[in-house]
Amino acid sequence: MHFPSRGLLSAAILCAFLTGCSKAPQAALAASGGGGGSAKDTKGRKDAPDFALQDANGATVHLSDYKGKVVLLDFWATWCGPCKVEIPWFVEFEQQLKDRGFAVLGVSMDEDGWKAVKPFVEKEKINYRVLLGNDQVGDAYGGVESLPTTFVIDRDGKIAAVHNGIEPSNGKDEIRNEIIRLLDAKRSARNRSILSVPAIIAGPAE
Amino acid sequence: MARGAEFTEHISVQVKPGFHVNSDKPEDEYLIPLRLTFTGPLQVEEMVFPKPERLKSGFSAKPLVVYTGAFEIAVKFKVPPNAQDGPNMASGKLRYQACNDRECLKPQTAEVNLSLDIR
């Protein structure tokens, strides 16, 4: 349908949009985490910020609860198509690797909260813990201006790799390989030395 | 602009190359639709969105119903009979959510302001 424009008003805004201009650069946190792929050397890894978020049962979950495990921390949303490509990958990883000390944590950035997220989790049969995110945790992880943003965190709670967006061709294998390398890696030297402190040995006096 | 007068304004929108925004009627229940709302002295009589395109995407089994590039939203306004004389402003908000073939940006809101002189 067409109706005549009077053209008497001042010009309506040209909306600049979208994307790119509204996309704040991922903060130093993400950049230092290794942006886009291969796991960073242990020396270059920054601490993954701890958080306290609620899961679907109302329980409060901290990242620090998972110390000692390799964690895939996935920021996603039900309205994010590329995120939905990755979710089946992560379901598979959780199933295959959880007994090796691995866990997926999905942080939903849905503004509609559990109303949107719970039905989606049930429909997609997500087998890993899903948490409801907020601006604070997003800011702590560099802003998370785009989704999916996926952090691979080592057993010491440090960010080994960051993935912004998906790579449909080899993204699954790349992330899986990163996880396996971290699972196979020895614990950090500090932790090893603590673990190897011997118990007191009793023996005959000299 | 006289009280009781009707007129149409075309809101121009430009989407950056490589990105798309959902149309006002996306076919997936989870997608965030394009929404334009106004507050202020003008009444919105009708809003016409352009015909969207159906975009094949690597991350969706169904084509996405979206806008890309430049498009216009035609808004038919009416000046209410009790509108105040003099300069007035109608404030609009365009809510959108954009993606490319690898990632999606968080929903954003752009301000749309129309100024007019009512007599």
Image (cartoon, grey):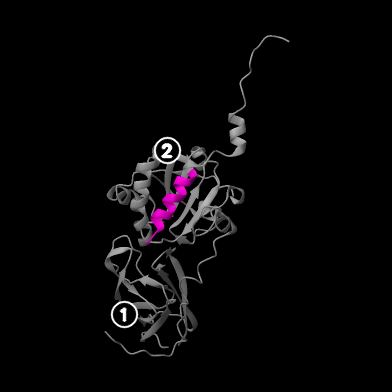
Amino acid, disc 2: Arg
Instruction: Assign a secondary structure to mark 2.
Output: helix
Question: Could you tell me if residue A8 is visible in this image?
Answer: yes
Q: Position of residue A23 (x, y in %)?
A: 50, 67
| Amino acid type indicated by mark 1 | Pro
Q: Quadrant of residue B44?
A: bottom left
Q: Position of residue A64 (x, y in %)?
A: 52, 40
Mark 2 = which residue? A100
The quarter of the rendered structure image containing the N terminus of chain B is: bottom left
Q: Are marks 1 and 2 on the same chain?
A: no
Q: Which residue is mark 1?
A: B50
Does any portion of residue B36 appear in the rendered image?
no
The residue under the point 39% across, 36% down is A99
* B84 in magenta: no
Q: Which residues are magenta?
A: A169-182
Answer whether labels 1 and 2 touch (C-beta < 8 Å).
no
Instruction: Identify the residue at horizontal 34%, vertical 67% (top origin).
Output: B33
